[in-house]
Amino acid sequence: NFEDVLQVGCIINTFIRRADVVGIACIAQLVNVIAPIMTEPGGASWKQTIYYPFQFASRYGRGTALKLDVDCPSYNADIAANVSYLDVAGVHDGDAGTVTFFAVNRHESEAITIDLALERFGEAKSVEHTLIKHDDLEAVNSKNNPDNVKPEKKDGATLSGGKVSVTVPPYSYSMIRVTL
């Protein structure tokens, strides 16, 4: 369901942030009943909600993992204190000339404005924002509704003075790609 998009996004972000110790990560779901792509024998196929964070990380999470300083509000959970509402990871791909950020807003009701400083990467030429958001955390993709939860290109990200700024809605997953 859509809630799994947020969870998988956070897990992948953890792998990126810890690329210094995580050499490879695999998902058992590829051979299980919750695979990223579902099929019926001789019939339809559709992408599960979790397909998209895996797709984005696989396609755009290549290069050098960045060590980011994140400053945003936090909350206390049953198992941890001061948990940041924003879970974010970044990757610089020098060959492609891009910096890509993957962000999960874990706040249930507040949008968060993300300001990303790019001063060590040279001039930014463009930015694109892809968002996965659904009002129902339990929303699923199915054979009859395969695009219920899917990414959408947004136009709210801005470039100014070596910074990217974008506001992400509550309970959402974003990919922010900057072309250098």
Image (tube, helix red, strand yellow):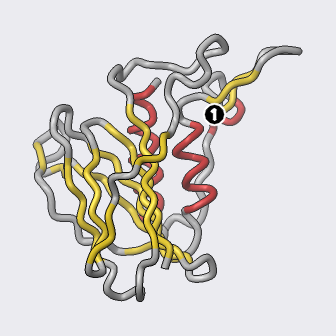
Q: Residue at x 40, y 74 (%)?
A: 66
Q: Position of residue 164 (x, y in %)?
A: 31, 68
Judging by the rendered image, the residue that carries numbered circle 1 is 36
Q: Check disc 1 and report its element: helix, strand or loop.
A: loop
- Specify the farthest residue to the right: 42
Residue type highlighted by circle 1: Pro
User: In the rendered image, is residue 20 in sight?
Assistant: no
Q: Position of residue 31 (x, y in %)?
A: 71, 32
- Specify the farthest residue to the top: 144
**Which of the 4 quarters of the picture holds residue 45?**
top right
Using residue 78 as the reference point, say whether residue 121 is left or right of it: right
Q: Residue at x 63, y 38 (%)?
A: 28
Query: Badge 1 local density, few (<14 within 10 Å), some, or many (20+)?
Result: many
Q: Residue at x 39, y 38 (%)?
A: 6
Q: Position of residue 128 (x, y in %)?
A: 45, 59
Q: Nearer the viewer, residue 43 or 129?
A: 129
User: In the rendered image, is residue 61 in sight?
Assistant: yes
Q: Judge whether 105 appears above or below 30 on screen.
A: below
Using residue 87 as the reference point, say whether residue 36 is left or right of it: right
Q: Residue at x 61, y 76 (%)?
A: 96
Q: Nearer the viewer, residue 33 or 4?
A: 4
Q: Judge whether 98 appears above or below 37 on screen.
A: below
Using residue 168 as the reference point, say whether residue 146 is left or right of it: right
Q: Nearer the viewer, residue 135 or 79?
A: 135
Q: Judge whether 91 appears above or below 110 on screen.
A: below
**Which of the 4 quarters of the picture holds residue 24?**
bottom right
